[in-house]
Structures are given as C-alpha cells and as structure tokens.
Image: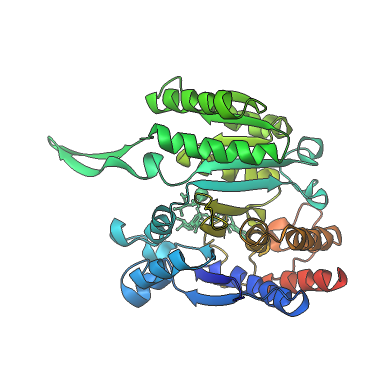
C-alpha cells in the first residue's frame, strides 16, 4: 500500500524554523517505527506571495485537497502589512480552511506538570489542566457577507457580518459532542445570546442536537465574555468548550497562557468524517509567525510537533505513536529543556529551536 501523504506548508517567520524540527520527527517515525510518509512541500502566505503574487497558488490548493493531511507552520509578518487585503498572507490560510471545509478546529490546552510553575496563573489553578476548545472554523464573522469598507455619506464604514446557518452550528456541535464522549462527557458552549441573534440560534441548535442525539452529554451554556473570565479564574471547571470562529480564536490564545506559552499549543482542523476514512485535515500550531523572534533560532517548536502528534492520532489512526511523541515532549520538559519563551523567574539558559528538536529526538530514541 502507498505511504500516507503529507503536504508541508511551512509559511513565514518562525513557521519554517519550527517545521524543520517537525520534519526531523517525521523522519524518525519513518526510520524507527516503520511509519513512512510521502512528504511534499510547498509555499503559503507571504512566501507564496513573494514567489507567485498570491498567498496560495491554485496548484497548492489542489494538492491540499488530494493529500491525506496538511501540516502548516505559520503565515504573516510586518513585511506584508501594506499589501492589498485580498493577497495578505492570512488569506492563504483562510482559503485552505474554507475550500477544505475544515469546520471543526480542535485546540487542546494541556498543562504539562513541568510547566505548572511557569504559567502566569497560580500553580494549583493550572496543574493537571486538560481542556479542548472546539472552534467553528469556516463561517461566522470571518466569512459572512456583506463585508468590506464602504463609503457612507462623507465617511467610510467597515463592515463584517456574523452569520451562522443551522447546518453549520449543527455539524460543529456534533463534532464537539463526539469528542466529549471520548473524554469526560461534558461540553460548555459559549456565545453571546444576550446580545446577538446568531448567538440565540447557536444556543438553540446546540441544545437541540444534544437533546436529540447526545442525551448522555452534560451540556451547559455560557456567555463568551464570562467564559473568558472563567478560563483564567478556574479553567479546570471545563472539559470541552464549543464556540464560534471569532470567540474561539480569542479564547484559544487565552487558554494558551494557561499552559505556559503560546509556543505549546497545537491544533487540528477537520472536515466531515468520510465513509472511506478519516476526514480532510490540516494541522498547525495556534501561534503565528512571531516576527519579533523570527530568524533567531529562539522559537519553541513544541506546538508544531504536537500538531504532528494530532495528525498521527486523527488522520493516521496511530494513537499509540502520538502518545509516544507526547510522552517524549513531557520527558524533555521534565528534564528541564526550555526554549526562551519557557524561561521563568528562576532564570537559566534557554536552548535553541534545534536543540529542543535534538532533545525530543533523544527522548524518542529512549522510548524504544
Ligand atoms: P504570534 O502568535 O505570531 O506571536 C505572539 C507572541 O508570542 C510573540 O511575542 C511571539 O514571539 C510569541 N510566540 C509565538 N509563537 C511562539 C513560539 N513558537 N515560540 C516562542 N514564542 C512564540 O502573534 P502576532 O505577533 O499577533 O502575529 C504575527 C503574525 O502572525 C501576524 O501576521 C498574524 O496574522 C500571524 N498569525 C498567523 C497565525 C497562523 O498562521 N495560524 C496565527 C496567529 C497569527
Ligand atoms: C489563528 C490565527 C488566524 C485566525 C489568522 C492568521 C487568519 O489567528 O489561526 O488563530 O484568525 O484564525
Ligand atoms: Mn489566532
């Protein structure tokens, strides 16, 4: 049988730096675990704009629709700030999500024991934390029409539209409930039904899906602003959080800091489960291209490596190997490996991106 196929789109800024370490990890699984992938690489974001004048070439889009999974680094950067909106690096990523129909974005936030002291919150608030944010990814205010900057009388008006159909809410709710069944069975759905009609519909549909097909799930609803507060007050009250595209973007960056650093958070973006096999999927860290540290060998590659672990689990049915990789990361953190973003008040010398890769490969070897 042919090897499973992976398309790597490293992107901009620290994207290629962290992806370099993921490629070493992929190579390790091929060599040591007989788990080889057919890997191809292409451009996305500013790098694609520089080469082709577009943040995602049509050929790259077509390839993304063919492969078993896409791994993405990060896109964007100050160099591209003044580009026309239609060709900004971020548009490349949004096109991938939309055309691959990746409506369910899983953003786990787990606090590794070794980092519990390092969070900006008190240790007992975050120790043992393990939550999963399910963010709707292909609709809402990111894509709703009308949108644009228009002339209105003697001034301009900027418009974006929060729009959700019942079907869009239904399908992402199901993905959260399915996931919750494999965890604690608890889902908290977040919107602003107190001020937004789209929030009222969101709440109604989520409740109906639960009552009809998932009566075993313990479902609660919370206004998203309270949710943000509760996430930093007492995050362990949550297991699965279900929310829309924009609230999910913000709440997941917030959850990142519970784990110690944005450099730790992976994500999986999944489409509809197919009868033939796993859904279309794209895996990427939650963080961006980090222009402030790009090119310095300082970036933490763990979020991107954990994103590959999610690919092993969700696209390739290799849960045990995913767990092996996660355990290797846990080991190196317990042994004190720290990139600069993980340096706490206790000080010490940070290691580089490549040295973190070395340490993880060493721990993988030791796991055999
Ligand atoms: P960012 O996530 O790039 O950086 C925020 C802060 O976190 C910075 O101080 C950065 O140094 C730090 N950081 C992020 N990842 C890190 C890592 N792996 N290791 C160590 N430190 C890390 O967010 P930003 O600065 O607001 O955005 C920069 C660019 O990235 C923008 O163009 C934005 O649109 C883009 N962006 C892209 C993605 C993506 O590709 N999925 C996600 C978020 C932002
Ligand atoms: C993310 C990013 C993206 C988003 C941008 C880069 C389009 O912030 O993946 O969290 O807003 O979804
Ligand atoms: Mn974001």
- The quarter of the picture where residue 181 lies is top right
Q: From the viewer's perspective, is 259 left or right of 143?
A: right
Residue 269 seen in the current view: yes
Going by the picture, which residue comes out furthest to the left? 153
Total tally of numbered discs in the picture: 0
The quarter of the rendered structure image containing the C terminus is bottom right
Q: From the viewer's perspective, is 208 left or right of 92?
A: right
Q: Note whether 287 is above or below 43 in the view shown.
A: above
Percent coordinates x, y for residue 263 in the rendering: 64, 57
What residue is drawn where x is 61% and y is 59%? 315
- The quarter of the picture where residue 179 lies is top right
Give the colour scheme of this rendering: rainbow
- Between 302 and 340, the residue placed more toward the observer is 302
Q: From the viewer's perspective, is 98 left or right of 295?
A: left
Residue 14 seen in the current view: no
- The quarter of the picture where residue 277 lies is bottom right
């Amino acid at each position: 049988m042919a090897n499973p196929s992976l398309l790597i789109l490293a992107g901009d800024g620290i994207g290629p730096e962290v992806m370099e370490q993921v490629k070493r990890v992929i190579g390790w699984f091929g060599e040591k675990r007989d788990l080889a992938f057919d890997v191809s690489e292409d451009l996305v974001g500013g790098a694609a704009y520089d080469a082709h004048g577009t943040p995602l070439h049509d050929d790259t889009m077509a390839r993304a629709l063919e492969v078993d999974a896409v791994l993405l680094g990060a896109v964007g950067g100050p160099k591209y700030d003044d580009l026309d909106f239609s060709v900004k690096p971020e548009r490349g990523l949004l096109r991938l999500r939309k055309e691959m129909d990746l409506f369910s974005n899983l953003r786990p936030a787990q606090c590794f024991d070794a980092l519990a002291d390092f969070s900006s919150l008190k240790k007992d608030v975050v120790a043992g934390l393990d939550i999963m944010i399910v963010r709707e990814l292909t609709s809402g205010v990111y894509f709703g029409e009308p949108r644009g900057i228009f002339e209105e009388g003697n001034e301009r008006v900027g418009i974006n539209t929060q729009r959700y159909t019942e079907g869009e809410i239904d399908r992402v709710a199901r993905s959260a409930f399915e996931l919750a069944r494999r965890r604690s069975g608890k889902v908290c759905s977040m919107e602003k039904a107190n001020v937004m009609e789209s929030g009222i519909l969101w709440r109604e549909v989520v409740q109906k899906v639960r009552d009809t097909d998932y009566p075993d799930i313990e479902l609660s609803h919370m206004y998203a602003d309270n949710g943000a507060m509760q996430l930093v007050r007492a995050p362990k009250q949550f297991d699965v959080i279900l929310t829309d595209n924009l609230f999910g973007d913000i709440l997941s960056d917030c959850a990142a800091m519970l784990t110690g650093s944005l450099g730790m958070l992976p994500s999986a973006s999944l489409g509809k489960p197919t009868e033939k096999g796993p859904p279309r999927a794209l895996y990427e860290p939650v963080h961006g291209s980090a222009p402030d540290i790009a090119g310095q060998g300082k970036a933490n590659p763990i979020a991107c490596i954990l994103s590959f672990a999610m690919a092993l689990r969700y696209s390739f049915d290799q849960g045990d190997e995913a767990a092996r990789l996660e355990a290797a990361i846990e080991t190196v953190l317990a042994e004190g490996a720290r990139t600069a973003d993980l340096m706490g008040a206790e000080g010490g010398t940070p290691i580089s991106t490549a040295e973190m890769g070395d340490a993880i490969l060493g721990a993988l070897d030791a796991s055999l």
